Amino acid sequence: MHVKTIILPSLLGLALMPTMGAALEPIEQLGKNLFFDSSLSTPPGQSCAACHAPEAGFTGPTSAINAGIAVYPGAIHNRFGNRKPPTAAYGGDSPLLNYDEAEEVWIGGMFWDGRATGWTLGDPLAEQAQGPFLNNLEQNMPHVKQVIRRVAKSNYAGLFEEVWGPGSLDDKKDVAGTYERIARSIAAYERSSEVNPFSSKYDFYLKGEATLTPQEASGLALFEGKAMCSACHISQPGLDGKPPLFTDFTYDNLGIPKNPKNPFYSAPKSVNRDGKNWVDPGLGGFLQSFLSNYESELGKHKVPTLRNVDLRPTPDFVKAYGHNGYFKSLEEIVHFYNTRDVPGAGWPAPEVPQNVNTDELGNLGLTADEEAAIVAFMKTLSDGYTPTP
């Protein structure tokens, strides 16, 4: 059982700028500029928003990619990562990566495998923001100084020094400190009310300002009961009254099959030495670098928030689900949760067969109507709902 215990940008990024939300604080606006600045890649053209777009719930914005390979190309378009982009929203409360002795689970950190632990900066979200710029499969910047120099040449350099003080864009004497300020600014935007507005139908329902349909209400009851979804995706407000984040920030192996369309399998040996035999170790792979008892965490990936899980720019837009994007609809992944272990269901073998969660999914005994009700409920988690007067 899981614990219930987070000017403007460059012209290249301008088209992706969202306009929703309340006025931002200066540091949040600075982070927004950085988030949408497509000049911060080599070659230019790849911003954070290229893989984390607001219209798709701050995750992958290209329907055709989601429907197929699910992982996204980097600034060099024949290079791909190995996992689907997670949402950049509603992650700011993720604690530092830590092991809960009582519950025997790892909690916190950022990225699917938890490697942005927060142990260095005291903030997993800021540590995560430092990663993609220098990743040659993503924004492919050659070094930190180059990132800083691009920011110093941007139209928002003045705002940077307004927020952080004169001389704060230093690429010589305080490179590490400047890069940290860049990351903390992005994290501030990712924690802002623009990215985390808590404006879904379910939020209005919790405030007594919206009514769930009978199917949605049935789905909520199943979500919190028979289907056991809320064991990991917390659906009720906290003791402080804060709206639920629909994640407990833990890690799980759901038994998801390999995504055979993932281009990482055919990446050069310098990137993927195992080729088609590569297996995603998840959290265990990260822990292996410094722990001897990592085997029990192999195949586990961070439990994602379900907020905006169905947010899409058009009704026919395809979203991908699972750490590798194997599933192409909410209906499909809910059916998998329900029937993974049912004889004759026809699901391929898990990518990582050890440590598969058999307590909370696999053979839930849900009917087709009950599956549909759970999907209907999850569709109430999309931000931007306007209650009827």
Image (spheres, helix red, strand yellow):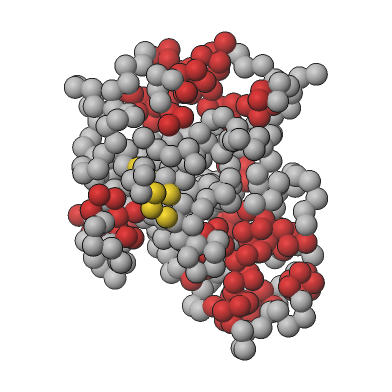
Residue 339 versus residue 121 in the image, above or below: above
Side (left or right) of 168 relative to 176: right
Is residue 37 at least partly visible in the picture?
Answer: no
What is the count of numbered marks? 0
Position in image of residue 325 (x %, y %): 39, 43
Q: Is residue 5 left or right of residue 173?
A: left
Give the answer, above or below, for where 272 lies relative to 240.
Answer: below
Query: Which residue corresponds to the image point at 66% horizontal and 64% vertical from the top-left?
Result: 185
Residue nearer the viewer, 167 or 13: 167
Residue 111 lies in quadrant: bottom left
Q: Quadrant of residue 237?
A: top right
Residue 255 x %, y % = 28, 38
Q: Is residue 56 above or below residue 106?
A: above
Q: Which of 109 and 63 lies nearest the eye of the viewer? A: 109
Give x and y (percent) for residue 151. 66, 74
Quadrant the N terminus occupies: top left
Q: Quadrant of the C terminus?
A: top right
- In the displayed orientation, state which residue is furthest to the bottom: 173
The image position of residue 131, as x and y in percent, is 49, 66
For image coordinates 23% across by 22% down, the residue present is: 342
